[in-house]
Image (cartoon, rainbow, N blue to C red):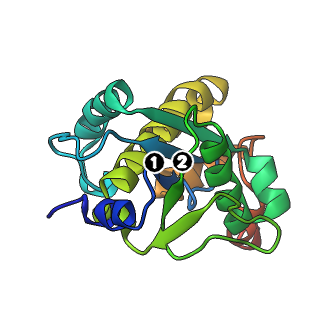
Amino acid sequence: MDLWTPEREQWNNGYAVLCGVDEAGAGPLAGPVYAAAVILPREIDIPGLNDSKKLTEKKREALYEAITAQADAWSVARVEAEEIDELDILNARMLAMQRAINGLSVPPDLCLIDGNRDRGSRVSITAPHATIVGGDGKSASIAAASILAKVSRDRYVSTELEALYPQYRFAKHKGYGTKLHYEMLDRYGPCPAHRKSFLKKWEARRP
């Protein structure tokens, strides 16, 4: 599949500098939600580039290095667990994406946003943008952003959170609600990295 079709459409519309934007980690019980914004050179060939969810961890790691080495500009941002609890996850996702866009060293003319949401109840994406449903499998720029966001989050959870709270085994489950993670929650209770608003089901079934 040609991943440059959405970019070509926007170049033809007069937008010269395009960035792809995607987020990772909306669903886990713990850790931040991450987002990335990437401006790629026009029609650059990065072999294997695809939606991060369709790639192995090893392939994502290799593509992360290729993307960051070759991108015209890239930025990764995150919204912490306590911010997620205060805002809710939809607003936190929008904030993470806007923070990533704000971090770019080159201002984009248009941002291609994965999904169909560009605002929550309190936070909106303010940069000029267009949303693309399933964009991480349709647009090279969004696919690149999905990889940077996913790898950055996985690295943080597997190293920093793992070191801070080794009893939860974050490197194993990356904060997602796996059987192992719930077992660790049952044993130790939540830590500061947990999203308290995501633990309501777990709290409800506790004796």
Q: Total of numbered circles in the picture?
A: 2
Q: Label 1 belongs to which residue?
A: 17
Q: Label 2 belongs to which residue?
A: 108
Residue pictured at 73% horizontal, 54% vertical: 195
In this rendering, position of residue 172 left or right of residue 191:
left
The three-letter code of the residue at mark 2 reads Pro
Earlier in the chain: of badge 2 and badge 1, it is 1
- In the rendered image, the quadrant that contains the C terminus is bottom right
**Secondary structure at numbered mark 2:** loop
Measured as percent of width and height from the top left, residue 82 is found at 81, 49
Residue 37 vertical position relative to residue 169 in the rendered view, above or below: below
Measured as percent of width and height from the top left, residue 137 is found at 29, 63
The three-letter code of the residue at mark 1 reads Val
Quarter location, residue 92: bottom right
Residue pictured at 36% horizontal, 46% vertical: 144
Q: Mark yes or no: residue 143 visible.
A: yes
Callout 2 environment at 10 Å: few (<14), some (14 to 19), or many (20+)?
many
Kindly check if marks 2 and 1 are in contact, taking CB atoms under 8 A apart as contact.
yes
